[in-house]
Image (cartoon, helix red, strand yellow):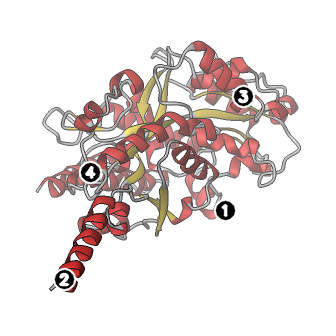
Amino acid sequence: MKKITLLAMICLITVSSVFAQGSPDAKSSKEPKPLKWAIKASEAGRQDFEALVDIAKEAGINVEMVVLPDPKAGEADKLLISLMAGDSFDLVISADSNMSAYYNAGVMTPLDSLAEKANFDIKATFGDYPASFDGEIYGLPDSVDMALTLYNKDLFDAYGVSYPNRDNWTWEKYIEKGKQLTDESIAQYGGFNPLWAHYNYMLAIQKGANHYKADGSANYDDPLFKEAVEFYYNLGNKHHVNPEILIQKGKQMPLDYFTSGNVGMCVIGGWASTWLTDTAKYPRDWKAGIVPMPYPEGYPKSSSVVVSNIWVPSTSTQKDLAFKCASIFAQNRYKFSVGRIPALVNLTDEEIESYINDNLLTSFAGDDISIEDIKAVWFDSSTVPFSEKVIGPAAGPINKAFVEEASLYGIGEQNIDVTMKNIQTRANKAILDVLK
């Protein structure tokens, strides 16, 4: 009996000791798991992403990047399918225009309550940049891609054309200078813009038009959109500043055709400024310059923007930690990207000046681009930003309608009135399909 009692006491002491110390499994379960950051295959290995992971680690947060296939035109989004199936991810970075599909699918976490819990003031930090749906914030903006005009200084010099004026750069002046630089006999053009959807409607938005009416239907019967389509294709067909659409397609001109040296100007997102800084990929023996995106004469200065947002999927099991990490990413990513400016509205003048000197000025030193040039392009508070993309129901089908219908107008296969009627009809049908 004494032996049994003694054994029982030893067992009791052992069990008590284990519970007092906590079992290895119980103890380890309290440690936060690495946050799973879903990225596209084309983003794997990006230095700015790697830098963000390092910054998170310094803050005590481990982040694991999970690579998913890039979504292809006409194919289902692998990330969306995965999230709808319940797979757990904690962080995603998307352009604001691409987020509505995830919101409609119900796979995004609203951030207002998480911000309140973390005592983080989103509005004071990011102003109006965060992606929001139905009055709730769903994304923290990590950077803003603001459009600009790249131009070839050597080509301007060779033809005796004065450089674009950064303080008064209108579409009318773009056309005027572009004509002086164009020589179609040697495939040289004053301007070049890739065949992307937003060029079809950018002028309308700069003049104050909206993609949607108050009732949610398409607004492409607004005469400003007709004017915008005509304006875009007239750059090639009438003014011969840009190559005509058939020439672009026939010669398969790539989106970075500006770097060939045969183009005077290119109006494009700020991300393309890396064409100037990546001399290993784009070697050249000519100097380039930058000025803001042109705007219509008689209207306020404006520039298209694409806002990149970090959001937390609804399947995240560590939402508070994910929000903390997202706030760290959002406040630091711009430091590691050329051509993507901070979305922070609380930076001081000294911080902006330091950022320009440390991150941008040295990158453009070989082209003699000045601090005044950079400020005019990306830090002019009088410039009105507008979304480069359609943000709202059926954005994808709407862009497709513009590309398909307007290109028929551009090659003379369809008149402008039929073109705009078809775009309006297709857009309204796509909107209804989404809202069913």
**Residue that numbered label 4 is attached to:** 108
Q: Residues within 10 Å of mark 2 (few under 14, many from 20)?
A: few
Q: CA distance from mark 1 to mark 2?
A: 97 Å
Disc 1 packing (10 Å; few <14; some 14–19; many ≥20): few
**Quarter of the image where one finds residue 252:** bottom right
- Label drawn at residue 358: 3
Look at label 3 and name its amino acid: Asp
Sequence-wise first label, 2 or 3: 2
Residue type, mark 1 in image: Lys
Which residue sits at x=65%, y=58%?
Answer: 253
Residue under label 1: 251
Q: Amino acid at mark 2?
A: Lys
**Residue assigned mark 2:** 2
> Which residue is painted at 40% across and 27% down in the image?
126
Q: Which of marks 4 and 3 precedes in the sequence?
A: 4
Cα–Cα gap, marks 3 and 1: 40 Å
Alpha carbon separation for disc pair 3 and 4: 36 Å
Residue 256 in percent (x, y) is at 67, 51
Can the viewer see residue 420? Answer: yes
Report x, y in % for residue 107.
24, 56
